[in-house]
Every structure is written in structure tokens, then in C-alpha cells.
């Protein structure tokens, strides 16, 4: 009898990669150069998108005394502000990122990054076998994505340096973090959407390699944290809209006081609308008890301190100086309930036989993700004018993120503990008692 000998097969992770990272050939250099040009094109398109309405406003406003080039420089300054850069004027240094404009720039980079990461015919035509992180990085388009981000940063710095010859120069070091963050978020969105769709074999192979090495704690905690963040955003939006409706008369009175004309009123309204996500972050900070700081005015649960404020209609929604109605500390129930949902999802993501500590780890990691996002949004949404009374407009990011993390974690651990005890008690009741026999 003869035996058919089969070669030993290795695990997929131990097989050599069939799609190794190519060397830096002329063709590969051109591909990376195209990726950098795509990043630079995003900068140009973003500035044009900001410049068009700015120039139209300049043409429509008869009161304007600025020149064409000064107005163009203002467009670059607005683009830089969306990246939380510092714009230096003769009277004060301005930092305030209108987050709707920032989100628009992220969507622009997301669209461009899709073309860079997913438009690689030589790789997309086959499914590579990933044998290591280098092959996975190449399958994901990591080199192209890095070149894309680098092109965005370099083009942004060059453009901001050009605008520095105007009336309000941009402090270039302050532009770097935002110029890296915006295209990086766009690239991450490309990978996230592809993770949900599975339309491109090469990228999917790289994502599978990453998922196989992602701790269970992360894969189960992040989706629950995203749900909590979406829920908190919805609550804060309703809170902001409700406050504006309640204080609408005072807001309209401030509009009448300004007497900015049709064009000025329209520009002011659009500017405040672009900062709506900022106000939502500030509302969430108030819900946690961290409060909101607008210059010398601080609004907490118990009181609103007096201080000088600019005549800005949206600030009319702030409460009058003095003591606030008692019991507003109950607003902390919002992040606690959000944490409860996180705990419910964490308990459901784990198996029924998992220990309490396993479920709690998932909940605590999700709370840390919520806190990390809150820290980033708190930093992005906060600005001010220095020197002057409006040195801080927004929140204290570390205090805000710390309180939100703690409150969400408390709610999550509480719900995980209750559900774990209930399931343990149900399982205990279902066990047969000692000494009893099953009936036949």
C-alpha cells in the first residue's frame, strides 16, 4: 500500500506574503507623487470653497474697505482657523475652529483619500496573502495614505505662509496638528467604510489581517462607544435648540442692537451656524458639570458668573448672572444613562459565561474611547482671543473629558454588574438541586 504524502500547510499568517511591499521604483515614486498632489489639491479646493462665499460677501457689502488680496488672505485665515490654527492680528491672536467647516474639509479629504487608497489597479486586481505587517500596510495603501497626508500638510503650510504677508498672518506651528488630523481622519474613514462594505479585495485582506490581531476588548468596546457618542450628540443638539428657542427674544434683540445690515446679518448668522457643533460640545461639558467658560463668564450647575461679553447674538442664550435653579446637577444623569447603554452593549457583546471582570473591561475601554473623543473635541471646539477678556471660549478639555469618562464608566459598570448578577442568579436557579433525581 502506498501512502500519498501531502506537504505540511502553514497557517495563513505564517505563509510568505504574495504581495510584498514593492521597492521604490520609478513607477512607485510616481504613484506616491500623485498621492501627494492629491493632498495638495485638497488644500486648494478647501481654500477655494472658503474663498468663494467670502469674495461674494466682499462684493455685496458696500461698507467693506478691504482690498481683493486682503479678502483672499482672510479666506486663507478662515481655512487655517478650521484646523485650529492661530491667526495673529494687530489687536489680538484668534483661535476658534468652526467645526462644521472642519467637518466639510474632512469629507473633502475622505473623498480624495478614497481615490488614492482604492485606485491602485495593480493591487486591487488580486487578493494578496498577508504574511506580515509590511504586506498588510501595503495592501491597505499605507504608503499612499502617508504621502497624501504629507502633501496636505506641506501644501497647507506653504499656503498659510503666503497668507502671512497679509494683515492677519497664521502662526505656522499651530497649523501642523490640525493639518495632520484632518486628512488622517479622512484616511481612517476610508478604511472604516471599506471595513463595512468589503468591496476591494486587497484592502479587505489588509483589514482582515488587522482585525485578526485586534484585541477583543477593542473590537467590542469601540462600536458601543460610537453608539454612546451618537446618542450624546443627539441629546446636546436638542438641548442647544431648546435653549435657543427659550432665549430667542434676547437673541433677536442683540441682532437689532448690532444693526449690521442684510449682508452683515447673513454673514454673522452663517458664522454662528458653522460653530453649532462647538456649542454642542460646550453643552455636553455643562451636562457633565465641567461648565462652560466664555471669557470671564463661567456657567455651571449652580450659577452663572458676571462678566463682559461681546455683542454676539448667540451669546444671548447664556443665562443671566446669578444663581441658577436648584437641582441642575441632575443633568449628570444624561452621561450616566449613556454609560448604562454602554454597559448594556458591553454585557451583550461578551459571552454568557464570561466573568464580570471581562464584561467590565469592555465597558471601561468603551468609556476611555468616549473620553478620548471628548478630549479631542473639547480641544478642537475651544478657542479665544488673547490678550483680552476672551482668552478662553469653550471648555477645559482635560476636566471635561475626565468627568465625562468617569460618569460614563460609573453608569456602564453599574449596568454590567446588575446584568451579570441577574444572569448569574437565573443560571443558579436553573441548576438541579443536589440529591434530586431526574424523573424518567
Image: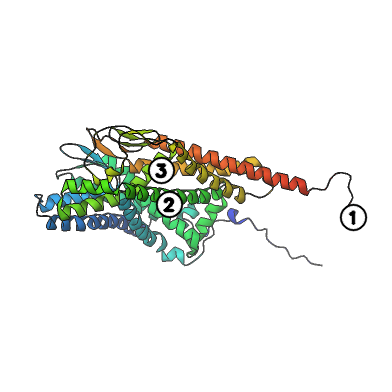
Is the C-beta separation of discs 3 and 2 under 8 Å?
A: no
- Find disc 2 in the rendering and name its residue: 234
Residue 141 visible (yes or no): no
Residue 68 seen from this side: yes
Name the image quarter holding the N terminus. bottom right
Labels 3 & 1 near each other (Cβ < 8 A):
no
Mark 3 and mark 1 lie on one chain; the one further toward the N terminus is: 3
Q: Secondary structure at mark 3?
A: helix
Q: Measuring from the top left, give residue 153's x and y in whole percent.
A: 30, 48
Judge left or right: residue 304 versus residue 405: left
- In the image, which disc is placed on residue 284? 3
- Indicate left or right for 166 with 86 as reference: left
In x, y percent, where is residue 27? Answer: 36, 61
Counting the numbered discs, the total is 3
Q: Which mark is residue 137?
A: none
As helix, strand or loop, the secondary structure at mark 1 comes to loop
* First of labels 3, 2 by sequence position: 2
Circle 1 sits on which residue? 439
Give the image quarter of residue 320.
top left
**Lateral position of residue 172 relative to residue 412, left or right:** left
Mark pair 2, 1: CA separation: 56 Å
Q: Nearer the viewer, residue 315 or 33?
A: 315
C-alpha span from label 3 to label 2: 11 Å
Q: Residue 83: x, y in percent? A: 30, 46
Q: Residue at x 49, y 63 (%)?
A: 197
Q: Earlier in the sequence, mark 2 or mark 1?
A: 2
Binning the other alpha carbons within 10 Å of mark 1 as few (below 14), some (14 to 19) or many (20 upward) gives few
Disc 3 residue crowd, few under 14, some 14–19, many 20+, Cα 10 Å: many
Amino acid at each position: 500500500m502506498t501512502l500519498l504524502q501531502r506537504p505540511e500547510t502553514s497557517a495563513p499568517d505564517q505563509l510568505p506574503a504574495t504581495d510584498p511591499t514593492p521597492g521604490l521604483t520609478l513607477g512607485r515614486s510616481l504613484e506616491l507623487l500623485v498621492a501627494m498632489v492629491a493632498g495638495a489639491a485638497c488644500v486648494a479646493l478647501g481654500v477655494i470653497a472658503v474663498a468663494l462665499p467670502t469674495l461674494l460677501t466682499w462684493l455685496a457689502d458696500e461698507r467693506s474697505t478691504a482690498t481683493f488680496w486682503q479678502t483672499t488672505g482672510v479666506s486663507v485665515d478662515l481655512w487655517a482657523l478650521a484646523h485650529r490654527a492661530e491667526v495673529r492680528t494687530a489687536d489680538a491672536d484668534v483661535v476658534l475652529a468652526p467645526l462644521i467647516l472642519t467637518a466639510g474639509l474632512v469629507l473633502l479629504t475622505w473623498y480624495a483619500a478614497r481615490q488614492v487608497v482604492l485606485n491602485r489597479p495593480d493591487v486591487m486586481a488580486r487578493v494578496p496573502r498577508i504574511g506580515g505587517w509590511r504586506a498588510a500596510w501595503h495592501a491597505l495603501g499605507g504608503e499612499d495614505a502617508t504621502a497624501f497626508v504629507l502633501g496636505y500638510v506641506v501644501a497647507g503650510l506653504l499656503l498659510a505662509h503666503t497668507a502671512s504677508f497679509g494683515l492677519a498672518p497664521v502662526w505656522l506651528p499651530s497649523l501642523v496638528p490640525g493639518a495632520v488630523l484632518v486628512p488622517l481622519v479622512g484616511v481612517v474613514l476610508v478604511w472604516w467604510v471599506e471595513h463595512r462594505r468589503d468591496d476591494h479585495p486587497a484592502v479587505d485582506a489588509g483589514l482582515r489581517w488587522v482585525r485578526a490581531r485586534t484585541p477583543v476588548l477593542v473590537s467590542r468596546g469601540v462600536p458601543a462607544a460610537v453608539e454612546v457618542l451618537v446618542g450624546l450628540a443627539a441629546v446636546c443638539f436638542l438641548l442647544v435648540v431648546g435653549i435657543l428657542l427659550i432665549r430667542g427674544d434676547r437673541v433677536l434683540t442683540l441682532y437689532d442692537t448690532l444693526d449690521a445690515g442684510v449682508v452683515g446679518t447673513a454673514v454673522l448668522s452663517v458664522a454662528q451656524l458653522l460653530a453649532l457643533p462647538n456649542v454642542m460640545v460646550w453643552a455636553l461639558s455643562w451636562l457633565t458639570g465641567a461648565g462652560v467658560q466664555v471669557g470671564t463668564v463661567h456657567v455651571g450647575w449652580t450659577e452663572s458668573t458676571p462678566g463682559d461679553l461681546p455683542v454676539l447674538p448667540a451669546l444671548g442664550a447664556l443665562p443671566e448672572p446669578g444663581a441658577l435653579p436648584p437641582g441642575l446637577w441632575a443633568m449628570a444623569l444624561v452621561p450616566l444613562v449613556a454609560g448604562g447603554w454602554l454597559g448594556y452593549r458591553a454585557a451583550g457583546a461578551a459571552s454568557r459565561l464570561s466573568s464580570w471582570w471581562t464584561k467590565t473591561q469592555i465597558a471601561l475601554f468603551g468609556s476611555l474611547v468616549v473620553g478620548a473623543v471628548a478630549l479631542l473635541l473639547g480641544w478642537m471646539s475651544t478657542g479665544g482671543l488673547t490678550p483680552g477678556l476672551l482668552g478662553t471660549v469653550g471648555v477645559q478639555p482635560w476636566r471635561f473629558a475626565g468627568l465625562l469618562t468617569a460618569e460614563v464608566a460609573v453608569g456602564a459598570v453599574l449596568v454590567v454588574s446588575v446584568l451579570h448578577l441577574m444572569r448569574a442568579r437565573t443560571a443558579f436557579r436553573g441548576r438541579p438541586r443536589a440529591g434530586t433525581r431526574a424523573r424518567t
